[in-house]
Image (spheres, rainbow, N blue to C red):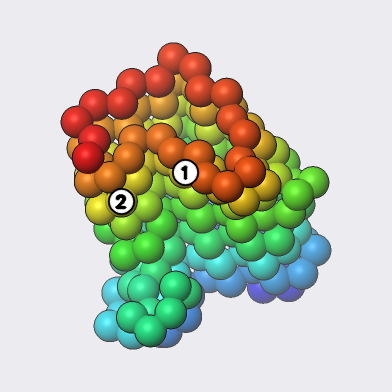
Amino acid sequence: MDKSLQIRGAGQDKTHVFCDAPDYVLKFAGEGSWTVEGLTLEHTGKLPASVVLVEAGKFTAQGCKFTGGIRNQFSQQLGYGLDIRAADSISISKCLVERNERAGISVTGKNDGMYLIEGCTILQCELGIVVHAGKCRINKCSAEKCRDCGIAMTGFAVGEVEGCTVRGNAQHGIVLHHRAQATVKNCQALNNG
């Protein structure tokens, strides 16, 4: 999609979008404003794909489920629940992101981007939430049973992680890499590697 678009369902248990094509279920490109609300987006194919790819613009997701991302075994591409690239801003709230072979939510971002992730549950992904750049607030999220870490901030990401629970992840609960800076408040880290 390369024009502003709103896709609203009747709820993630009632409205389902299935796709077995490679690369992605939905791709948003260009400087539009994108909204998905109240639906399940699921990749059901056998070829590598991310569930949602956002290349630019403003992206909002509320009350959705993103599942089934399959990674490319020969590169670090694809396999994400939400793959946010050079978006100006995002707001992801009350979403369930599960069973994706790479990150549940990956924000490559822009250094001047504004990113809000709140009230989301990430289950059984390689990485729960990873932010590489921009100003990010991760609030009241849960990242559990990931094969690596629950929440990671890396690169030039700056932000706040508050009221989150990271539980049963194979490596780290919350980790900062490279030049990332974050304030971590009132979080619970339980039974992580």
* Quadrant of the image occupied by residue 45: bottom left
Kindly identify the residue that appears in the image at 62 percent across and 51 percent down: 155
Q: Which mark, by number, is residue 171? A: none
| Residue 114 placement (x, y as % from top left) | 72, 41
Kindly identify the residue that appears in the image at 32 percent across and 40 percent down: 172
| Residue 98 in view of the camera | no
Query: Quick one: SS at disc 2?
Result: loop
Quarter of the figure that contains the C terminus: top left
Query: Quick one: SS at disc 1?
Result: strand
| Residue 59 placement (x, y as % from top left) | 66, 52
* Quadrant of the image occupied by residue 41: bottom left
| Nearer-the-camera pick, 184 or 33 | 184
Q: Are marks 1 and 2 in contact (CB under 8 Å)?
A: yes
Q: Residue furthest front?
A: 178
Question: Could you tell me the amino acid type at mark 2?
Answer: Asp
Residue 165 left/right relative to 23: left
Compared with residue 30, is residue 94 higher up or lower down, i.e. above or below? above
Residue 61 left/right relative to 95: right
Q: Residues within 10 Å of mark 1 (few under 14, many from 20)?
A: many
Instruction: Write down the residue under mark 2.
Output: 148
Kindly identify the residue that appears in the image at 38 percent across and 84 percent down: 74
Distance from Cα at disc 1 to Cα at disc 2? 10 Å
| Residue 175 placement (x, y as % from top left) | 44, 38
Instruction: Write down the residue under mark 1.
Output: 152
Kindly identify the residue that appears in the image at 67 percent across and 54 percent down: 109
Question: Could you tell me the amino acid type at mark 1?
Answer: Ala
| Nearer-the-camera pick, 97 or 183 | 183
Compared with residue 50, is residue 167 higher up or lower down, i.e. above or below? above
**Across the whole image, how many numbered discs are drawn on residues?**
2
| Nearer-the-camera pick, 117 or 36 | 117
Compared with residue 186, is residue 95 higher up or lower down, i.e. above or below? below
* Quadrant of the image occupied by residue 142: top left
